[in-house]
Image (cartoon, grey):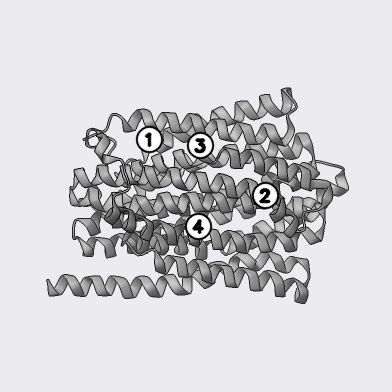
Amino acid sequence: MSSRVKNMTEGKPAPLILSFALSLMTGNVFQQLYTVVDTMVVGKVLGVNALAALGASDWFNWLMLGVIQGFTQGFGIMMAQEFGAGHEKRLRRVVGNSVCLSVLAVIALVALGQLLAEPVLRVLKTPDDIIGGSLLYLRIMFMGIPIVMLYNLLASILRSLGDGKTPLNAMIVASFTNIALDLLFVMVFHWGIAGAAAATLIAQLVSSVFCIYHIRKIEMLSFERSDFGLHKDMTGKLMFLGLPMAFQNAIISVGGMIVQSVVNGFGVIFIAGFTATNKLYGLLEIAATSYGYAMVTYVGQNLGAGKVERVRKGVRAAVGIAIVTSVIIAAVMLIFGKLILGLFISGSAEVFEQTLEVAYFYLAVMSACLPILYILHVTRSAIQGMGDTVLPMMSGVAEFVMRTATALILPRLVGQDGIFFADIMAWLGADVILVGSYLVKVKGLMGQMGEN
């Protein structure tokens, strides 16, 4: 077994979860670093209109990414369970089956992305002076969907085996690659938004090659040709796990697109300020996402090993760690937020101040409510690790309803600042479902353990 593979069915839950999450967190920091650099280069070099164009394309781009991540995370649940149970042959077949399903998904997503890019931007009421840049960015990113799928599948395989270090190192390499290419493509070659998109995709390709190199060293993943194929029973279970997660991410994205359509009606300066903070959203969520990935692996492995009590203890520890982390991040953003946001914005003094005012108010609202988001990630991922992706999907529906209702109603009552509360209400709606569902499910599992 590779030294990077981690069995999470033994040892104290809190240190295991924290150490695994820290590797993922560091990797996510570097992933967000090149997202932030993209935004900084576009905002500072190309101006407020280019920044707004990037923002107007964000949610549709995230929809495609969310579907990809949903499928690959769903596949990873089954991988973690087979690894925890010690079924190496079935693990290889799960990975092989997942590869085949991913290829089919890529073909469909590339075609849909290219077909729907312009109509979606029109439906979102993207202003005429930025729609050209938004469309160009989306077309390039959607052509790179095979690269994005490849990285996410490889990272999911590694995380399911408890290896958080390889995805971390892959992200570090990708981050420096992306930053160098951003500077080259945008500032030297003057390729504009197209250069920022190309830099991102090339960086992800580099990270994928890095992951492949390390996966080939894991003995239990020494594949045979027979491991690859669509095995009926396994395909059904993988789709049962992956489809709800993909749908969950997709419907959350649709809610985000409705929010974006409302934002687009408030003018380019408001869009640019909203975009600047949205690009920091990844930093706000970085630890939450990492704890979530850790919980899917931790719960999946322990459930596969039949250790239900460890699942309960681990989730309780993770919630405590997550809340403390969210408070620290919120404090940092409230204190240094204006300084950070100023790095994304350019223009005259008046434009700069107006854009910064919009951005900081949005950042302050999200930061103050960050613990709600962190509880969401831990509980949702714990339920997913149990092999239930339907309840998390329902929480995604709740997010959609709350986000959409808030975006459409609150700005009419209190003005454009009301749009900043759409995400908060979405998180609350999801938490109501997830916390109750987790408590019911873990009680049921403990009861089954008692009967056995």
Residue most extreme to the left:
452
| Residue at the spot of label 3 | 147
The residue depicted at 72 percent of the width and 22 percent of the height is 188
User: What residue is rendered at 34% in x and 30% in y?
Assistant: 214
How many other residues sit within 10 Å of disc 4, few (<14), some (14-19) or many (≥20)?
Answer: many
Which quadrant of the figure contains the N terminus? top left
Residue tagged 2: 117
Query: Residue 341 at what x, y percent from top left?
Result: 69, 47
Amino acid at dot 4:
Ser
- Determine whether, in the image, residue 254 is placed left or right of residue 208: right
Residue hosting label 1 = 166
- Whichever of labels 1 and 3 marks the residue nearer the N terminus, that label is 3
The numbered mark, 4 or 2, whose residue comes first in the sequence reads 2
Mark-to-mark CA distance, 1 and 2: 34 Å
Which amino acid type is shown beneath numbered disc 2?
Answer: Ala
Residue 298 visible? The answer is: yes
